[in-house]
Amino acid sequence: MAASPYDLANESGYRAWRDAKLAAYPHSVDELIVPLADPRHLTPSEIGALEACCARANMAIYSAPHLPAADKSIPKQLAQQLGLVHLEGNYLADEDGLSSITPATDEGGSVRGDFIPYTHKPINWHTDGYYNTLDRRILGMTLHCAQDAEAGGENALLDHEIAYIQLRDANPDFIAALMQPDAMTIPARMDEDNVARPEQSGPVFAVDPEQGFLYMRYTARTRSIVWKADAVTQAAVKALADVLAGSEYILSARLAPGMGLICNNVLHTRSGFSDSPEHRRLLYRGRYYDRLRFDLNHPTARAA
Ligand SMILES: [Fe+2]
């Protein structure tokens, strides 16, 4: 196996990988939009187009505005064809395991309304499931737009590999600090889905020991999170926040009905938004323990 570009001792391998990654990275989210005739039944060329986007940016945005946008089978079956099958269930998810992200009717009173996703409020940079243990990593994530807001509700998106590159270029010690198993600790608490969770410590960046991909768990939240107190970790966290505040590689997407994001749990935000009775924002979110794969519909894969 080739030496990993994520090995801090492998400077030449890192340089080659980095330069290729930055050269291929899209300048606009428009480069990642793939029209699909029917997301429930992908063609080989559509799979190829989605794969090409994900190779560049760990994400793709599909578009199928001609189909009924509120049909949950669209994101569910699309995900299945791309290897996303192990859904994280949580008690606020719908029966099919997807979560309907929409403002609670009474933001002060309901259980959902206690948690930011179910409000009109902005959500700062994070990867999904950052509080999960490493054996329950959220590797894949989908967001399908059934209805967009009257105004606002955009998602900023950044491939976590780009965040890694910008931090490593600033100072490789920042990467080492954020790969420490106790870099980030979520105290025992109730999570956003109101499930009691024990304290979780873990790295921000981790490399999968078998497949070699980079995984990131992160939240820009400052409440209910404890960063390792040593100076280099503190400096690394500050540098990462600076990257997320102004990276030239940040993409911005506004999902319209029938559009959706598929990704390897990249960094993302949501801007605040306003609704109207005709434009009550509704997104179906899927969190998966799987990473995207694109070889499932190939004849060779079927035969294997
Ligand atoms: Fe999220």
Image: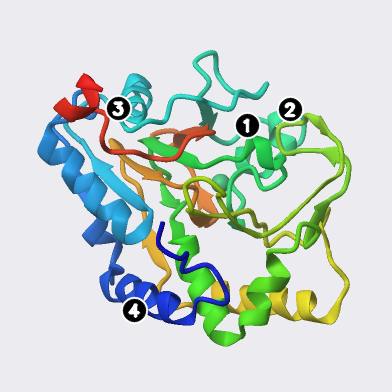
Q: Which residue is mark 1?
A: 104
Q: Position of residue 243 (x, y in %)?
A: 56, 77
As drawn, 178 above or below 47 = below
Question: In the rendered structure, which disc, 1 or 3, sits on the residue that comes first in sequence?
Answer: 3
Q: Nearer the viewer, mark 1 or mark 3?
A: 3
- Is residue 295 depicted above or below 248 in this figure? above
Are circles 2 and 4 on residues that touch, CB within 8 Å? no
Q: Which residue is mark 4?
A: 19
Q: Which mark is residue 127?
A: none
Q: Residue furthest front?
A: 1
**Residue at the image point whose x is 49% and y is 48% from the top:** 265
Q: Secondary structure at mark 4?
A: helix
Secondary element at image label 1? loop
For marks 3 and 4, the one nearer the N-term is 4
Q: Is residue 158 left or right of residue 293?
A: right
At label 3, the amino acid type is Gln
- The alpha-carbon separation of the residues under discs 2 and 3 comes to 35 Å
Instruction: Give 223 or 103, whichever is nearer the viewer.
Output: 223
